[in-house]
Image (cartoon, rainbow, N blue to C red):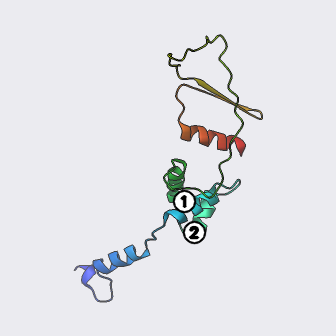
């Protein structure tokens, strides 16, 4: 006997309707606000997600979008770190017609030091800097 046709049970179409009715649609502004709460030093993504009734994995995905600039303008201000540019030891001066090879990024922040050689992924560099500042 098919249980979906028994009296007192929900039909498959009713179950689908109620499942889709529970799905929350978040605006870009709401996503950005939730993500920005997770970027506060000491914030827990899981706690922020739970407080808004969102799965933590979803919030991590929104954070990835946010870091890639796909959640629009942020209300938080961008914090810049001081940068010094030093020539590599033994490097010859580069003329305007010559293209320099990919460089090296050496980051010193307190006791931590990071060296990135070649083409650096901006998102990865941002994540490393955020981790070092925490």
Q: Quadrant of the N terminus?
A: bottom left
- Looking at the rendered structure, the secondary structure element under dot 2 is helix
User: Given the current orientation, which residue lies at the most extreme front position?
Assistant: 96
| Nearest to the observer: residue 56 or residue 77 | 77
Residue 38 lies, with reference to residue 10, above or below; the image says: above
Residue 85: % across, % down: 67, 26
| Nearest to the observer: residue 121 or residue 46 | 121
CA distance separating discs 1 and 2: 10 Å
Residue 125 lies, with reference to residue 24, above or below; the image says: above
Residue designated by label 1: 56
Residue designated by label 2: 52
Tell me the mark number nearer the camera, choosing from 1 and 2: 2
| Nearest to the observer: residue 19 or residue 62 | 62
Relative placement, left or right, of 36 versus 58 is right
Residue, x 63% and y 60% (percent of image)? 37
Residue 106: % across, % down: 66, 27
Residue, x 32% and y 83% (percent of image)? 10
User: Given the current orientation, which residue lies at the most extreme right position?
Assistant: 110
Residue 48, by quadrant, is bottom right
| Nearest to the observer: residue 44 or residue 65 | 65
Q: In the rendered structure, are the residues bearing label 1 and label 2 in contact, judged by CB atoms less than 8 Å apart?
A: no
């Amino acid at each position: 006997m098919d249980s979906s046709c028994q009296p007192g049970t929900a039909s498959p179409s009713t179950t689908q309707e109620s499942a889709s009715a529970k799905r929350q649609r978040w605006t870009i502004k709401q996503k950005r606000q939730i993500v920005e709460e997770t970027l506060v030093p000491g914030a827990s993504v899981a706690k922020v997600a739970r407080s808004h009734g969102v799965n933590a994995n979803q919030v991590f995905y929104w954070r990835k979008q946010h870091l890639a600039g796909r959640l629009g303008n942020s209300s938080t201000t961008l914090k810049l770190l001081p940068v010094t540019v030093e020539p590599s030891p033994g490097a010859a001066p580069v003329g305007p017609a010559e293209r320099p090879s990919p460089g090296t990024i050496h980051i010193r922040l307190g006791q931590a030091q990071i060296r990135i050689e070649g083409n650096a992924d901006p998102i990865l560099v941002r994540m490393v800097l955020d981790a070092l500042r925490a």
